[in-house]
Image (cartoon, coloured by chain):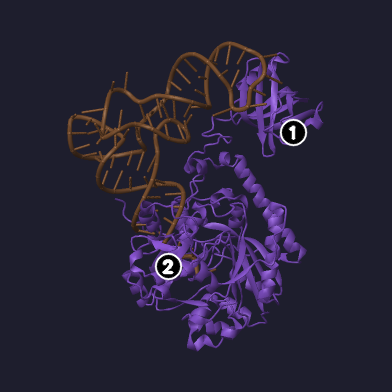
Chain colours: A purple, B brown
RNA sequence: GGGGCGGUAGCUCAAUUGGUUAGAGUACCGGACUGUCGAUCCGGUGGUUGCGGGUUCAAGUCCCGUCCGCCUCGCCA
């Protein structure tokens, strides 16, 4: 070893010992006769002092050290003594008085310094990811990620789950997200697809008798990116046989609690609260509400159907909805300009045509449109929304889905802007009873809400012919801090029911055989009842680190246009490679 | 595909209504300094203002196009 200790572990108890450290120059302070180097590794920072009269041959080296040089230092651990202690460092009571030192590697002047408080733009950080990753905040994120995955493995190991890997080179299925394709050299003109998830494999593992499976699985989806979405990401993938919905939920309750304990030192209270899909859509306008704060949506459609305010009245008459939020003590928080521009603009991105608002003043509504509502209507609205003087009431009048999307977005904005919650809290809830299918207006057919292998709620089997939109699925989402943090379902385990679903989704038996034949075939050979779930590991790490960006919890993430700025990927390839694959490019004309 | 924000020294930023030689901090280079920890002090180097056009006596600034990064709508079974 080139070191005897790390830069984070020396303290007053080591005084007098001779130790060797190795690390990066985090900071240098050259006083002529004495040079101080803050030596950094991922364990911490230790100050090295070079007294230049003691040994002249290290003088030149000590004074030549610059940011990010890699050095090895041997010396005596000495107490810094009164007045020289640095309380900001865990190692601040001591320093290593260098007796000898060796430059292990000189660094070019780095484009930015890991210790800097102001970060350079993200383009540069991604290009020099190896320097960005030296920053203590990112190192901390990687450590939290490690802790979480270890907690996951320990938890499942304790329950006799097997960790089983599934292929990366798979087969394309037209449903769902766009696939990443890999051309086959051997099979001319054919392509593998990278897995969007190990969904079909894990079901087949159940048929194969591996009744408790998990995997920390890489998944790939060729869709546009977001702050919480990368083209390649990691799922904690779980499947269990001989279980019912309740068993999955309680297993995952335990997992999430164990994850929380591993990072935060204490378990989460379980069982985690449960809501129905209908309930959260009504109350929060989204299937992934952030319940670190309340701020519920109220529906006042019935109260304003007969008002003189045309917008509200006509909306209700068209069978649509007037819904809104009561923002406590916010009457003076947002100016008319902010309401009319910023907040209206916010709901506008979700299709809302306007944002109506009132202040509650002297027990009445106060705004330019208040005159269209009589006393009785005003009182009813205030009462419905539990309004009090000083509150701000805001409304969106639109279709159900637009009012949901707009108010959910507004609610999230307000929660953050008004600091309605503790940002370090981890708040989880289950959302149950999703609809099995949703009507696709464009394609004139039903689409699977979760995926086509999802079992039906036993009470709703009767709706297949009468009203498929009413069928509830045996599916469940785990929502955490407003993110979809896990999603799963009990699966269909007999081919006949599976075909019934395919019929509903307009997938013919021939289509089904073509696309999922291998699964259908497996189901015919003794498939046990089974179900599972997948957790988005990156998002969980992000929540536990308190971050809002998934790139900060992935060692080598991609940009919004899915490129790796460090690697320069994707890249063009050699003509010969294309020839081997029988691929000819047909690129759009460059202007 | 749509909307928004950004790109000026290695880095973080500034630059009035379009007007002198594009500045500051930091880094870097040289010098001074024996107790600093954002060390300090003195001096210096460093610019294709993302790229390409255009308007103008004059463009970092205005116009058109384009590239890159971020946020977002659509998209993500």
Which residue occupies the foreground of this view, A433 or A134? A433
Query: Where is mark 1, residue-wise?
Result: A3
User: Are the numbered discs 1 and 2 placed on the same chain, yes or no?
Assistant: yes
Element assignment for label 1: loop
Whether B49 is drawn above or below A416: the answer is above
Whether A64 is drawn above or below A433: the answer is above
Residue A210 pos. (x, y %): 71, 71
The crowd level at tag 1 (other Cα within 10 Å; few <14, some 14-19, many 20+) is: some
Whether A228 is drawn above or below A206: the answer is above
Element assignment for label 2: helix
Residue A315 pos. (x, y %): 36, 73
Residue A554 visible within the image: no
Which residue occupies the foreground of this view, A526 or A133? A133
Query: Where is mark 2, residue-wise?
Result: A403
Which residue occupies the foreground of this view, A7 or A68? A7
Mark 1–mark 2 CB contact (< 8 Å): no
Of the residues under marks 1 and 2, which one precedes in the sequence? 1
Q: Residue under mark 1: which chain is it in? A: A
At a point 68% along the width and 82% down the height, the residue shown is A526
Label 1 vs label 2: CA separation?
62 Å
Residue B29 pos. (x, y %): 52, 20
Q: Quadrant of the N terminus of chain A?
A: top right
Whether B15 is drawn above or below A221: the answer is above
| Front label number (1 vs 2) | 2
At a point 59% along the width and 29% down the height, the residue shown is A67
Residue A326 visible within the image: yes
| Left or right of A320 on screen, residue A24 | right
Which residue occupies the foreground of this view, A137 or A479? A479
Q: Residue under mark 2: which chain is it in? A: A
| Left or right of B71 on screen, residue A167 | right
The crowd level at tag 2 (other Cα within 10 Å; few <14, some 14-19, many 20+) is: many
Residue B75 pos. (x, y %): 44, 65
């Amino acid at each position: 070893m080139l070191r005897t200790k790390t830069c984070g572990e020396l303290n007053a108890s080591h005084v007098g010992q001779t130790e060797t450290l190795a690390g990066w120059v985090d900071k240098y302070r050259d006083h002529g006769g004495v040079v101080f180097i803050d030596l950094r590794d991922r364990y911490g920072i230790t100050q090295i002092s070079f007294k230049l009269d003691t040994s002249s041959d290290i003088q030149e080296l000590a004074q030549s050290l610059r940011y990010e040089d890699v050095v090895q230092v041997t010396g005596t651990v000495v107490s810094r003594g009164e007045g020289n202690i640095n309380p900001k460092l865990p190692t601040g009571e001591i320093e290593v008085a260098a007796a000898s030192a060796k430059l292990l590697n000189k660094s070019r002047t780095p484009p930015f310094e890991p210790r800097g408080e102001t970060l350079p733009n993200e383009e540069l950080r991604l290009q020099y990811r190896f320097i960005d990753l030296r920053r203590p905040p990112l190192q901390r994120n990687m450590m939290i990620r490690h802790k979480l995955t270890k907690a996951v493995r320990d938890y499942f190991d304790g329950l006799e789950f097997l960790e089983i890997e599934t292929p990366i080179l798979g087969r394309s299925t037209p449903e769902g997200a766009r696939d990443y394709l890999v051309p086959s050299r051997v099979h001319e003109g054919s392509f593998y697809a990278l897995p969007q998830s190990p969904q079909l494999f894990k079901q087949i593992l159940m048929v194969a008798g591996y009744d408790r499976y998990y995997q920390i699985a890489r998944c790939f989806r060729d869709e546009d990116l977001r702050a919480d979405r990368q083209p390649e990401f990691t799922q904690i993938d779980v499947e269990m046989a001989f279980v019912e919905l309740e068993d999955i939920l309680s297993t995952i309750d335990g997992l999430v609690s164990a994850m929380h304990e591993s990072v935060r030192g204490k378990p989460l209270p379980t069982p985690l609260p449960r809501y129905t899909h209908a309930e959260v859509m009504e109350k929060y306008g989204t299937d992934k509400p952030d319940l670190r704060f309340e701020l519920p949506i109220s529906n006042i459609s019935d109260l304003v159907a007969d008002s003189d305010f045309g917008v509200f009245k006509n909306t209700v008459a068209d069978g649509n909805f007037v819904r809104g939020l009561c923002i406590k003590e916010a009457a003076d928080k947002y100016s008319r300009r902010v309401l009319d521009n910023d907040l209206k603009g916010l709901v506008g991105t979700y299709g809302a045509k306007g944002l109506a608002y009132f202040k509650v003043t002297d027990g009445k509504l106060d705004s330019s449109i208040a005159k269209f509502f009589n006393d009785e209507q005003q009182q009813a609205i205030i009462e419905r929304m539990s309004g009090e003087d000083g509150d701000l009431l805001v409304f969106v009048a639109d279709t159900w889905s637009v009012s949901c999307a707009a108010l959910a977005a507004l609610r999230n904005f307000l929660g953050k802007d008004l600091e309605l919650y503790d940002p370090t809290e981890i708040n989880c809830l289950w959302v149950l009873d999703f609809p099995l299918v949703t009507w696709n207006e464009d394609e004139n057919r039903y689409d699977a809400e979760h995926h086509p292998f999802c079992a039906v709620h036993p009470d709703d089997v009767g709706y297949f012919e009468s009203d498929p939109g009413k069928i509830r699925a045996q599916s469940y989402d785990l929502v955490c801090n407003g993110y979809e943090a896990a999603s799963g379902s009990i699966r269909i385990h007999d081919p006949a029911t599976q075909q019934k679903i395919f019929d509903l989704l307009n997938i013919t038996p021939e289509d089904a055989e073509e696309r999922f034949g291998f699964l259908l075939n497996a189901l015919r050979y003794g498939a046990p009842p089974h179900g599972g779930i997948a957790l988005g590991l990156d998002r969980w790490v992000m929540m536990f680190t308190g971050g809002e960006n998934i790139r900060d919890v992935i060692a080598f993430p991609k940009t919004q246009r899915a490129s790796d700025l460090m690697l320069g990927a994707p890249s063009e390839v050699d003509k010969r490679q294309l020839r081997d694959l029988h691929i000819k490019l047909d690129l759009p004309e460059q202007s």
